[in-house]
Amino acid sequence: METANKTSTVAACAQVFRLALRRQFFSRQTIVTAVLLGLTLGITALWAYPMPWNPDPRTSAQLASRILSPLYMGFLLPIICLSYASSAISGERSEQTLVYLLTTNIPRPLVYLAMYAAVLLLTLAVTLGGLAVLCLVPGKIGLEALGVFWTVTTCATVAYVGLFLLFSAGVRRATFLSLAYALMIETLTVNIPGVVNRITVSFYAKSWLYETGKPLDLAPTGAALGLFNPVSAASAQWVLVLASVGFLALGMWLFSRKEYD
Amino acid sequence: MNTETTTTIALAEVRNVSKWFGPVMALNGVSLDIGSGITGLVGPNGAGKTTLLRLLTGQIKPSLGEIDVCGHDAWSAKAKDHIGLCPFGDATWDELSGRQLMRVTAGLRGFTRAEARKRAEAVLETVGMDDRANRPVRTYSKGMRQRIKLGQALIHDPDLLVLDEPLNGVDPVGCEELNDLFRSLAAQGKAVLVSSHILHEMDQLADRILFICQGKLLASGSLAEIRDMLDDHPLKVRISCGSPRRIAPQLLTLESVKSVSIEPPSELLLEVQNPGRFYAEFGEFAAGNDAQVHRLKATDTSTEAVFDYLMERALHPE
Amino acid sequence: MSAGSLDDRNEQQRAAWLACWPIARTALLLVFRRKLFWLFLGIALLTFMFRFGVIYLLAELDTQQPGIGRMLSRLDPNLEGSGRTFLNFMLAQSTVTMILLAFAGSVLAGNDHQRGGLTFYLSRRINVLHYTGGKLLAIGLLVSLTTTLPALVLFLEQGMLGDTAKYFTENYNIAIGILGYGGLIAVTLGLLLFALVSWMPRPVPLVMSWACLFVFLPVLSGILRWVFDDRHWRLLNLWRDLYAIGSRCFGEAAVRSSDEAQLPEAAAVVFSVCLVSFIAIVVRIRQLRHQS
């Protein structure tokens, strides 16, 4: 009872934040992420260097449509978000250390919020940092692409982290569920006509990109051509923001009620 | 048989609590109080011990009934201010050193950095880990892990300490040290709830025992109290005396004595019906018959024997 | 050495190889117990159900409105019931098979490596090869559950809804192709997955590496092909390599001209992947056995 007077919930939440940040950063997923970003960086550097068979100067449109859109937005971004967010709670759960967080005097929603903040900070640092380096490698042309992509990347990261952390709070094997979402639901729904594809984060990120990225000639390609009916950038922004808030609120609610074994 | 001994102020109150996991009933209408001192929670595997501990520490909610810790619902954050848990298993944040783990745990309780450092050092000394605290936890032996886990449970000086098999893997000397620590905590007025399947650990340690089986609380109280209640089960008493052959027939005249057998050269083995009455009758008998009693010992008052009786009663109520 | 002891040894060897089945069965039961597996399997069978319905619909149209039926078949060659139909169906199952395998790999073998289950197996009268064989059998059966088996059912449906005897006698090579392509996928993915799980038993790194192999590398191969203007970079796409070899199992007609040129190179890549995976598995398991 004496302890209650000396302690502070804010300090406790800050400790959860620091602990989650540290555990996520010093993990194998950071190594794999670094390797992936390194490979992408290498490819971008190779592409940026004029080759005998392709001596034309590189353009920001090529960077956006050939590298950033398919490789970065289509694969790296969801995978990086997935690797940190889906393992945050389910990782503690499978390692049986979640009990130490659940038996502290911090209200459960705040534990979730602190973990969310830690994962979001780390993921944003990696995704935005990675994007900045990728765009800066080819030089000046990258700056234009960076200007278009960074806002979309930020919002998409926030939404993905919210969603995958929600999976992590709800399911023990959240990584697989997140993978199924990122690689199956998002990919499959793109090719389904109608409004079904509007359930995915990538739909809104792409809609936003296609509108603001007009100078970069960004447009639907391949199977999605003709089936992709984008919403306006403003609508996409609203949906991403509301979805992020919704995922966070739902996650806090779920985490505060769920009985973990 | 649910007996509630409330000699001290209850820090935790469990009121008619039931818990289902799907179709499985893990706890069935359990009511008990946990006051200061050491309380042992004993039961076979699957009895509901861990469920009870998880309910008390607010990890799960009861399906029916209420659990209060220091006046707060056990699920609430306020209740957890008063609880320290040393969970079963070896899991901790293994990549941290013992000292870092203590500081992090103090931080999780909301202490300032300076206070967290101070508490970490104090607790490391208390659990005897101060000289090994800079090593990563993953390099610790099982016994050292138990100590460091106990340390994290003590970091905020809780009123109710919940220990799930805390002596598991600890060497005999370490066990004695930890038992002394539990006793000193109990002497400070704290409630220490120790679950164990090693029944004889409880003989010397616990002031009060909770027997649990098949989700029901079979009995609670001190070992002697519980043994007294089991009046339909005979107690075996070994008496060492000067002339066993002379007093054996006389002992059979006592109402509480069911049978007497002579164990040469100087011992008698008695089966008695009601221990309380027997001790009273035997006192009078010994004083009046020059029995020359050197030693009297009840052979089956151990937790294990009592537990066997209780289990038998639970399984065959008639 | 007496004939009796030689017989005993042979008998023991035979018994040890027979132990592969209980190992595989136990591993499969572990996977079947997970709800998430049934969710993935359900998703995997969506494409199958869709194709099943379409084949039925086209067969009905063929009898009632032959003109419309033929027109629809021509519009989408994937529906005509040729080798390419089943080849493309099995390719379409690749993503869900990949996710299912990532999940199954963690349950089938990851837990053994992480939680000491390997000691349990190797304390029996079996060696590393028998243990590996059992686990590979389990992975292979899982792969077949989403690729070979549904494709065979579709093949049977296709035949039974038309002129049964004629379809089966004219297209028996399709059944061989399904089994061949299915077997190739099962062996390659089984070895690759098991090797990866042996070295990376934790779910998140496993999932990331697995996704890199089957999503990142194909995208990367496309970019590299464009950057260097060299078709050999396409060999980085393992799905494509498997498809190229698998199409050969369905007969020459099913092989695309672009794949035909790269067939030997694709075969070399797949063989190298299998060999490296096998070596990685044996080295890792021996290492773990010595550690335990």
Image (cartoon, coloured by chain):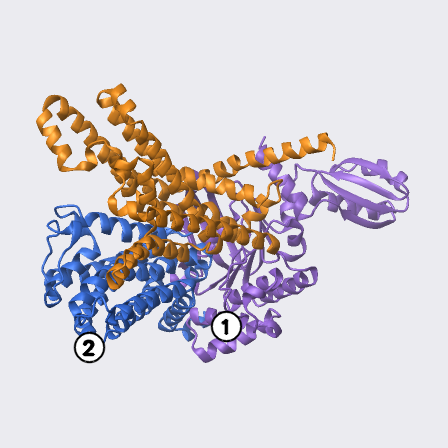
Chain colours: A blue, B purple, C orange
Horizontal arrangement in the rendering, residue B86 relative to residue B246 (left or right): left
* Residue receiving disc 1: B100
Subunit bearing disc 1: B
Question: Going 46% across and 64% down the picture, which residue do you hit?
Answer: B82
Q: Residue B167: horizontal and vertical position, in percent?
A: 62, 57
Q: Is residue C268 visible?
A: yes
Horizontal arrangement in the rendering, residue B171 relative to residue A177 (left or right): right
Q: Is residue B75 visible?
A: no
Q: Amino acid at mark 1?
A: Gln
Q: Residue C156: horizontal and vertical position, in percent?
A: 29, 26
Q: Quadrant of residue C244?
A: top left
Question: Going 41% across and 74% down the picture, which residue do you hit?
Answer: A5
Q: Nearer the viewer, residue B278 or C103?
A: C103
Q: Residue C8: horizontal and vertical position, in percent?
A: 68, 32
Tag 1: Cα neighbours inside 10 Å, few (<14), some, or many (≥20)? some
Q: Tell me, for residue A140, which label it has, or none.
A: 2
**SS for callout 2:** helix
| In this view, A16 is above or below B197 | below
Q: Residue A193: horizontal and vertical position, in percent?
A: 13, 46
**Placement of the C terminus of chain B among the 4 image quadrants:** top right
Q: Nearer the viewer, residue B110 or C244?
A: C244
